[in-house]
Structure formats: structure tokens, C-alpha cells
Image: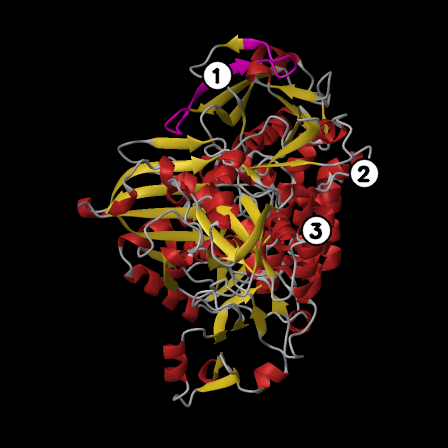
Amino acid sequence: MPKLAIALDLGTSGFRGQAIDLDEKGRIITTAITTRHPLPGANVIDHLHFALEVGIHVAHMVIVSAVNHVIDALEIEKDQVIRMAVCGNPIQLSLFQEIEIRDLAYAGKQKLESIGVVPPARDAQIVKASQIDGLDLAPDIDILIPPAVQHEIGADALAMMIQTGMLEKEEIAIVTDYGTNAEMALVAKGIVYTGSTAAGPALEGQQIEHGLLALPGAISDVEFVPDESRTRTASAAIDKPMEGRLKTRILNTDMSARTGDTVNPNSGEVLEKGELSAVGITGTGVVGLISQGLISKLIRIPRIRTFDSEIHLPDGITFTEDDLAEAGKAIGSVRAGHITLCKEAGLGMEDIETAYMSGASGTYVDALKAREVGLIPAGVRKIYQVGNTSLAMARDIVLDVDNLWKMKAIADDLKKHHCMFAASKVFEKVFILELSYWTEGMPLAQYQRFLAKYGMPALTEVESLPEVIKTVDRDIPELGYKGLRIIPDIGEQKVFAFEACIGDEACVSVCPERALTMESVDDQFQVTVDLALCDGVACRRCERACTEKCFDLVKLFTANAKRPGWDPEDIDRTMLPALKRVPGLKSVWILSAEDFKSVFQKEQEAEERSLLGLGKVVNTGVKKVLASQRVYVALTTMAFDWGCHATLVLKKGDEMVGEEVRDETRLAELSTRKDVWFMHKNFVIYKDKITFPQDIVKKVCHFEIPCLPAGFCIPDNDLRKHYSIIFATPSMLGDIFLKNRYCAGVDEKGTGTILVGVQLP
């Protein structure tokens, strides 16, 4: 049987995967890419915010569902896969692994200690697929996780430095991933200065009215060709836009640039037909357009100098002043980052000899045009365009596992200095200047005077042409013998009917990304959200626009997923009889949609209470069940068999340091060990894993109530081939709420509630 592997890049703007034949010397079979990230929001801060609002398990399951889509699109036999490597920034990898993320969301040691957060070790590791909840691969295959240098410098940034070879050269060089987070690293005198700026998705074509990622049909470059006859007769002293036309380049299905239409920028009139039609403009096209707009004087920042203040491109695509402002903020944040790193290193911008450009935008953009608008330090002598280094790193790791440990060795030995731009006064001052330049039209000379006043590195004038070395033609150089697969609909859809909704679609009409739809079903108005299109909790225009103030975005996010396949009523017809047959389950009900949030809130309240004064109790089990596609409430009696699984565990960070043991044989064995302390007759603490008893007293640890496999539930049909069935025990607050809502007349002494969830794989 062939041995296959999968390389996966979990990018902030989308996922990219490749299937690799290990028996054929690493021959690439297929490449699959998504057109968006599956989580709501435009950047990692939005993704973090979403996970904190709805729970990490909900975010994890959305990400893993998207990963499963990518794996399916690779069109390989999954039982032939023996390992998979993933690469990405710390936030994406943490959500994929479902480990602690609050240390990435909050700054400061005291803050983290006050909320009981122990940052996990984000080191190189190999885990089994069974440890990644919901991953649709054989449970025993290896998942290779690369290291982070520290929690701010992720595997993707490390990959960028390794793949370019810049760490092995004696030069002052800067590498930048021109994406949503714009990770960058400056190498000087053996020290690596790193940073990451929330450039936003404009550099990848998003948040631009007709923008899109680097996909077939996207305008990837623009060139202004002046009308020579008019240019010769025009007075050079007259500061007015030049007459001329715009030539476009468009990506084809192989992601190579081909000729697009040539148009009049004032009207969009086609002056010369090209090979391909355009469906939008990507970030590289935006950079090219701004560069050519400045040269032709069609743009005088912050204005577009056409009769309707828009630049017209082929096929009805336009570029507006709002687009110019969005792109300017992204460009400005990158340049501010470069200046900040130079200040940290005690260098001038002119000292940088070489620039490396990675990512899709860094590959397809015209490097000289990028330099003209400020994306590359003007004085560099060499520019390398190196492609998607994160996917390349994942591919190297999965081909040879030793590369994972080599990557770890580099991470351990790296002399690093990370600058958190969010807390940097240097970045703050420079970015304000960039905003003034791009959105208010501050003259560049005035910008330079302010830099001198603040003692910042000066901007270098664009003079001699640097050497441009394009090491790849595409961001993903090899697509495989089966070619490229594009996944346009990666978003999970959630559906909810708000009780007081009057169906006026006020929420739908204000959604800037058209992520919402509404339909009338059984005298209710159901709202559907596409998570991948939604701008997330940072937007919430839908909530503000709601006439009856009943719209609750978090409630919608945590509602049942709308998925193809089994209809909810079909699941009910299978599950309800199966649950009612279980000994010790007295009654069973479907958890109503309106009670989802109430149960979630009860568990949040219970978390803040201590167990015997020893630490917080986190009910991860109930949260996982509530993230299921169908949830049932069941009333248990004393006859219910809980099995041998632990219903309570003690954790320090993400490591289990104590657990309830229900197996009598194992209890007897543990009672003879000296490294075990019995906190209760069947609750053990492993003393070698914690500083005992100090960690308990100081409440460094926390208790978790996990979800458990519902092996007691045996459906009549093949439901288990398509779904997994889990259950969890609610807290006392949740139990009281559920009994009051569902168990009137059947509740009696010795009964309790459980929640049973049916999950898609």
C-alpha cells in the first residue's frame, strides 16, 4: 500500500494543503487551497476574540472541519496517509491543537497569573491524530507540530527565516510575509529582531471592494502606459493626471499571470482585449495600481483624480478612495514595522542590504512597485521573492521528520529580540505618521521632518535599481500531477431563530460581507450566518441594527451547524429511541435552541466558583457537547452506568496532573505508588507532575469536567458511521437549570442530568 503524507499551512487568510507520495521521493500529488479562513474576522485578533467569546472548542471544531475539507479536496485514500505536518502562527496552531490561547490574548505575567493561565509549551512535538478532536484521519497517524521561538514568534515566522537561508548569510537582511499579520524579521550581527503587525487583509486583496485572494481570475498586476502624443504636448508644470491606459495581468488556473484587458482608467472602456477576464483584484494588483496611479498622477494621496473618484479596471471592477485608504493602512503598518525594527537594532533603513518577500502577495507583486509604495526599504541592493515558506516548511518536515528536530534546534539557539508593536511607542509614533500620510495626505517631506524630530530612522530615497531574484514563479511552485483544487465555500453555516424577530431583515441589509441570510420556516424567521464571511465579534452591525434588539451574535455562533447529510429530524428519530433504551436514563428531551446560551452561561458562572477552595472548575465537556450538531438532555437514575472514564481531572496548563479513577484494579495499583497522593478515595494527584502541594494551594491548577464517549447509546442504524456521540455532566447550576426546564414531574431523589451531543466527524 502506498505511503502518503499531508503538508498543511494554516494561514490567517486561508488554508493550503498538499498530498505527497512518500514512496515516490516526495512527489506532490495534489494541492488544495481555501479562498478564506473558516473563522469569523479578518485577522488573528478577530479569531482570538471569537474563540474567547464562544469557547475554544467551538473555534477548534470550525478549524478542524475546514482542515477535513482540505484533506478531502486532495483526493487521496486517507487510509494510506501515515503522517501530516502543519505550520502556522501560534494562534492558528493553538486553535488546531485546542490548547490554551489566553496567554496569546492577554499581555503581562501578572494578568495571566490573576486569571490562572499557565502558558503551554509550544515546542516541537509529534501527537497522534486521535489527540486532535474531530480530525478525519486514522487515529494512530502522526501529526507533526513545529515549534514557536516564543509565543509571539511562531512556526511560520521561523519557517520564513529557515526557507530563505537568511540565517546562514553574513548580511543585514529583512524578511517579511506580506499577509494579514505581516510577520517580519530583521537579521543583524547575529541577532534576529522580530515583529508582527496587523496589516489586515488588504495586502491579500480582502477588505477591498472588488478584492480577493490570489486566485484564478484575479488581477495580479497593473501597468500604466502613457499616451505619448498627449504627454509631449502637455506642460510639465501642470500638475494634472497623465493621459494613458492601464494594462492588466490576470492569474490563470495554474496561478500564472497572463495578459488581461487594457482599459481607459477613467471609464473602463476596453482598448485592447487580453487572454483572460477578471473577477476581482488581489493585493499585488492593488500595490501595482497604487504605484502606477502615483506615477501617472491619477492618485494624489488620499484622492483619486478621475471624474468619479474611482479607477476603472476590466469587467466592471473599480478601485475607490476607500480602497486606497484600506491599502494605505496596510502598507503603512508594514513600513512602520520596518522602521521600528531598525530603531530596535540601532540601524538606519539604508543599512538593510537584502529584502526577502514571502507569501502569495510577496511572490506575485512587482517587487519594484512594492518598493516604490514603501513595502520594501528603498535602499536594498537585492530583493528575493521566495513563495509560501510556511507550506514549504511543512512539506520539508513531513518528508523527513528529522527536519522537525533541526527546526527545534534552530529555535532553541536563536538569539532573538521580539518587539511587540502593540506596546511599542516607536511603532505608535511612526504608524500615526503613516495614517496621516495615507488618509490625510501629509506631504512626505513633513513625514521625514517628524521622523528626524522623534529620532527615528529616516526613509531612504528610491535611487538605483536593486537586483530582483525570483526563486519561484508561483507562491506554491509545484501543484502536483493532479493539479490545484480550490475550495470556495469553506465556511460553516449556523442557523438560529430569534424568538422576537419580526423578519424585516435589518440585520441582513447592514452586513458588510453579506454573511447573513434569512428565511421564514414554520412561522419563524431563521437567520443563517456563514462563519467564513462574517467579520466577527469586532463588527456586530447586525446586533446594533436589529429592530427588536433580539439578535445575539454569540447565540448564533453557538447554534446548531447547518450541514449537508442527516436532517436533524432524522437524527432525532434515531437518537431518541436509542437513548430511551439505555438502562438508568429515565427521560430524554431535545435541548431547545433558546436554552443553548442559558446552559453555556450557567457553566461560565460555575467556572468562577472554587471546588473545595482548591481552584476553578472548567466544564470543557459541556462546552464540547454544546458545540455538537444535535444535543439532548437526559435524566439519569442510580442505575445509570458511568463506565470507567474519569468525570473530573486536574490540570496544570494543558497537562493532566490528577484524575478521578473509577477502575478498581487501577486504584489498587495506584495505592501502592509513592508518587501518587489520594485527594479523595478515588481522586489521585501525580506528585511528580506538579510542585505539590504548593501548586494546589496557590491555585495554579484547575479542574476540568471532560466530555466522555457515549458508548451506552447504540442506534438502530448506521448513525455512528457518520457521527460521534458524546456526553457530559453539567455543573450544579446547569443541573438545576435543566431540571427546572425539562424535568418537572419526573425529577426525584438520586437523579441528575447529562447532556448528550451528536457530532459530525
Gap in angstroms between the C-alphas marked 1 and 3:
58 Å
Residue at mark 3? 741
Q: Quadrant of residue 123?
A: bottom left
Q: Which residues, given as a range, are shown in magenta? A: 252-270
Residue drawn at (42%, 70%), measured in percent from left and top? 412
Residue 137: image location, x then y, percent: 35, 48
Above or below, comparing residue 142 to residue 489 in the picture: below
- Viewer-nearest of labels 3 and 2? 3
In the rendered structure, find residue 277 and report the number of the disc placed on it. 1
Residue 186: image location, x then y, percent: 51, 58
Q: Quadrant of residue 523?
A: top right
The one nearer the camera, 747 or 628, is: 747
Residue 396: image location, x then y, percent: 31, 52
Above or below, comparing residue 617 to residue 178 in the picture: below
Q: Amino acid at mark 2?
A: Lys
Residue drawn at (53%, 43%), measured in percent from left and top? 629
Assign a secondary structure to mark 3: helix
Gap in angstroms between the C-alphas marked 3 and 2:
24 Å
Give the side of residue 130 with respect to residue 427, left or right: left
